[in-house]
Amino acid sequence: MRLNNIKWNIDVIGKTKVWFTISGIIILAGLIALFTMGFNWGLDFTGGTVAEFNMHRTVTTTINNEITNILKNNGVKESQVKAIGPNNTHVSITTPSLDDKTRTAVINALKSKYKLSDKDLVSSQNVSASIGKEMQFGTLLACAVAALLMLIYIGFRFNFEMGAAAVLALIHDILIMISAYALLRIVVDTPFVAAILTVFGYSINDTIVIFDRIRDNIKLMRKSSYKEIANVSVNETMTRSINTVMTVLLMLILMYFFGPASIKSFALPLLVGITSGAYSSIFIASPLWVIFKDREGKNRVGNKVGNKPQKA
Amino acid sequence: MMRSRGLAKFLSVIVLAAIIAYIAFFGINAGNYSIKPVQESIRLGLDLQGGVYVLEQAEGKVTQDAMTRAISIIRNRVDSLGVSQPLIVQQGPNRIRIEIPGVNDPDQVISFLGQTAQLKFVGPDGKVILTGADVKNSKAVYQTDQTGVQQPVVTLELNSKGAKAFADATGKFVGKQIAIVLDNKTISAPVVQEQITGGEAVINGMKDFTEAKNLANLIRGGALPVTLKQVEYSSVGATLGPSALKASEEAGLYGLVIVLLFMIAFYRLPGLIADIALGIYILINFIVYALLHVTLDLPGIAGMLLSIGMAVDANIIIFERMKEELRAGKSIRASLDAGFKKAFVAVFDSNITTLIAAFVLFFMGAGTVKGFALTLIIGVISSMFTAITVSRFLLKSVVDTEFTKNIRVYGA
């Protein structure tokens, strides 16, 4: 089989209900998880202190409890102590934001108890609650500005039906990402925000290539229905759609499996979002476009009034 | 004629790219001109080399003057640690961002930065004469010396307790040095010329007014002029950083190899050309990083790797178009022209939206994602450039060599 020469012939538009149901189930499950359990917010948004130590021994439940007690003795009542890393020899301690004095006291107590050196404090981070609040606000603002700019751009580039379909597909992708995060309890931190905005850009971009082809085909297939035009366009661009997303996904998968923790935290939401973006361009945006066109009550392009395809 | 010209064009691009790559990665020294290798111009983020990042916030209402003084005191403290390339900048009206690479004990550094500054005047016998608490004011001014030349000097104004102690000490140590020590680092060691009794002294011998101003700032700020509170910090141990760098290099390399193979498997000759263009694209990225002095941190690497995955996107759109034209029976040359022409709008359009998102992220995102946004922006722009110029030029020259008429070579 020549991989590069598959002639695609999927009745994408005919199976619209199937695609919408698949997405609907994922989003519904995600939203239920979101409203019952909420997000697993990360440090960047909630504020707090996290430190990772190399303990040079397996962190057992006993050690775990000892650490919790050391924290309590230093006045830190709330804490989360977790064994991580190779063979569970590292420990990650998460607490509400600690001041410098308390933190130093805790670190020194741990150092002397487990005979650790400076080098064994692998990493630590503190975000005060006020910064967390600022981050939440800043993030919402950034997403709003990005969405607004995208809408303006789409307004320029597309006619109404295409614009509406592209925006709905975009909302679909964001919902899928949110669902994945809520369902899989993945920590929501600043990389998540970066990923959401990147998917904003990527999803629209992927839809554009298909819509661009629809615009071309409207001119070539004057006698065909919108359904046929959309089906032909989607299938013609199928190899392209799959190949472009494949190269990005390959990169992201390798980043996820081989990259260090903070690269992983970027790769995972991008994996979900970009997969969804590629899927939605074909299976959500294009069927939606057909639905909007058909709603107008004119099934044939030849009959169109006032919705001329824009020049490419 | 066409054939040899095509080959010559193709080879000249390859050779040119190779020369630029050599200069970029190994640097060059020719007489007065020298170009540093790009690796040396790209600063690695703290998460890659290990170190501490602290964001301090001044409490209450603060003036810009107080912030400036606080920054010079902190800079003095950080310098006394003897670390290379620290970064101390003001962020917003009341915050100071401090980045110190390569420190082993981040916690000590953080508490050290937060301390109240200790300013001491120490006599040659090692005894403390007076402390920062005794200094009422200190200013940099111009003073006319005996020869009538204006000299920058630093004035000292002491309180009554300080004035008495200072009078005793200067009486004892005429002709000797009194060290002014800030946080255990001697910032000035003027020689006592005569006994100073009035509680007002002058330190001369300043190189220029800036030096005088800095010293006055430091003395005056013996105690920090503002109360600083640490609102955010993160530290990465010396072992984690380099291992993170190694892991991301591996991830990037494997990903790159797979993308390269993928392109050849699917697009044959054009795929190979796209791979060459991808090589040139990566080269352009590194040169731009060096020119803009980009700090490459982990989010930045994530953006760079993502953009490598996306960079071939434009090539795929173009080659798929080309394949369709070939199958429709057009000649190779005509298909190539049509492919690039028809795909251009789609390529352009699709990159614009990614750019919009990346710019919003860059200007509005938190510090940690700025690096991601920046490398993504650089990546998207340079990938558009290489796809529509380099790939096209190379592919055209190969087509001009007319070495084959078999359209299968072109992936059709």
Image: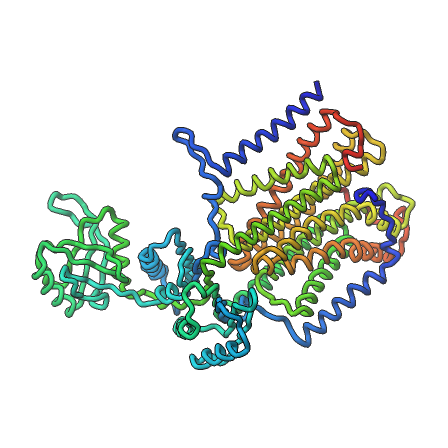
Task: Tell me: A106 left or right of A198.
Answer: left
Q: Position of residue A36 (x, y in %)?
A: 68, 76
Q: Quadrant of residue A177?
A: bottom right
Q: How is the image coloured?
A: rainbow
Note whether B157 is above or below B311 in the view shown.
below
Tell me if residue A136 can be seen. Answer: no
Of residue B137 and residue B133, the one placed in the foreground of this image is B133
Note whether A122 is above or below B314 in the view shown.
below
Q: Quadrant of residue B164?
A: bottom left
Name which residue lies at 81% across and 35% down. B325
Quadrant where the image shows the N terminus of chain B: top right
Task: Tell me: A257 left or right of A13.
Answer: left
Tell me if residue A260 can be seen. Answer: yes
Quadrant where the image shows the C terminus of chain B: top right
Q: Position of residue A169 (x, y in %)?
A: 74, 58
Q: Position of residue B128 (x, y in %)?
A: 18, 65
Q: Position of residue A249 (x, y in %)?
A: 69, 53
Q: Quadrant of residue A88?
A: bottom right
Name which residue lies at 71% across and 21% down. B3
Name which residue lies at 73% across and 28% down. B399
Of residue A101 and residue B251, the one placed in the foreground of this image is B251
Note whether B138 is above or below B18 in the view shown.
below
Q: What is the number of callouts on the image?
A: 0
Of residue A137 and residue B16, the one placed in the foreground of this image is B16
* Farthest residue, direction front: A57
Task: Tell me: B406 left or right of B155.
Answer: right
Name which residue lies at 22% across and 62% down. B137
